Image (tube, rainbow, N blue to C red):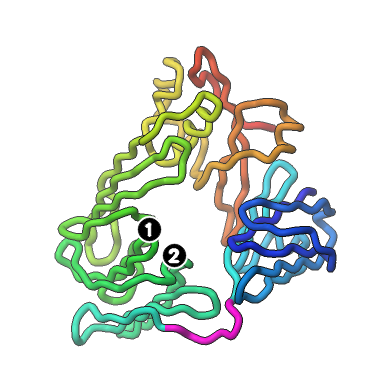
Amino acid sequence: MTIYFLSARTAALKADGIYLGLIDGFEKFLECDPAARHFIEIVPDGEFLPASFILGAEFLKNPPDFADVYTGDGEAIIYIKSFTARGGGLEVIAQSRISPDGGLFTLFYEGGRTYVSFDGRHAQLYETGGKFAAASLKAGKIGGRPVMIAEGDGCICIFSEEGKRVFQNAAESYEAGEKLKTVTAFATAAGCRAECVFAYDGEEMRLESSVTTETREISDEIMHFAFFESVLTRADCTKYLCDDLKESADKLRGFLGEFVDVVVPHSRFYLRHGEVRAAGLVYPLSRNRFVIKYYAAELENGKICNITECD
């Protein structure tokens, strides 16, 4: 089995004490028996502790909090998404209350991770992710109901008056008023951009409308990636389909399932399957665990006329 390693930070990869090179957004791989056990050490650049673990069947089935595991087509990808900072300690980033007698919201950084805690009638603690490491807290109202908004780097997190997290998503910009309005830019081939409207009833945020547009033209070589990404982001995918398939466009999501990302196949995929127009669709299995299924698109007169899963 081929195991690929990726890292959120530039890091040195060692397997059984042997240095294999540097990883970040560019991977290194290891050929191994999935039933075997190998000691893996990933040493990041900067003031962070190494991530060490025994690689085996149990790790691939139940990855720890610092890693995501993706499997598919006889391969596995291990993405180290967070590292623990050296020295530990807690650093308060921001604190605020919705009202003078309300519970206290604290945004803080500890051990390389960012959290929001709520000290009120019911104590709450949520990990928010690295994009909130320099965030701010701002009290506001949505639909006339009080909320606390954490504004991160290209994303927002919203909490109810009782400290419950009711929304967290990427947002290029947002507007909080009678409704919550967000603009989200996706990292897609066609530059998809979604404008969404949510209603809030004090307990949960409910999507009322969403319009996704593509902001740039794409070349024929990557047209199939743009198609799958348009299905994912709810953009107009019919522009990529032949007339016969356009009639069934509303059934595509049911056919493809609830995938959460689109990825480029590895070079070994093409060695096995040939020069097909394929993309990997990522499906969640369990906590930190995903499966990648590959789908090929057949073209006729520059339009997609058939979609099949690669065996």
Which quadrant holds residue 37? bottom right
Q: Residue 154 carries which label?
A: 1
- Is residue 180 something one can see in this rendering? yes
Quadrant of the frame with the C terminus = top right
Secondary structure beneath dot 1 equals loop
Residue 137 rendering spot, x and y as whole percentages: 30, 73
The tally of labels here is: 2
Residue 54 rendering spot, x and y as whole percentages: 77, 68
Drawn side of residue 76 relative to residue 122, left or right: right
Identified by mark 2, the residue type is Lys
- View extreme (top): residue: 301
Residues at marks 2 and 1 touching, judged by CB atoms closer than 8 Å: yes
Secondary structure beneath dot 2 equals helix
Identified by mark 1, the residue type is Gly
Residue occupied by mark 2: 131
Residue in front for this viewpoint, 309 or 274:
274
Q: Which residue is drawn at 40% across and 25% down?
A: 238
Residue 87 among those drawn in magenta: yes
The vertical placement of 196 against 189, above or below, is below
Callout 2: few (<14), some (14-19), or many (20+) C-alpha neighbours within 10 Å? some
Region in magenta: 85-91
Q: Which residue is drawn at 45% across and 83% down?
A: 91
The first of marks 2 and 1 along the sequence is 2
Residue 195 rendering spot, x and y as whole percentages: 29, 45
Q: Which residue is drawn at 34% across and 62% down?
A: 156
Drawn side of residue 259 relative to residue 54, left or right: left
Callout 1: few (<14), some (14-19), or many (20+) C-alpha neighbours within 10 Å? some
Drawn side of residue 6 relative to residue 244, left or right: right
The vertical placement of 80 against 238, above or below, is below
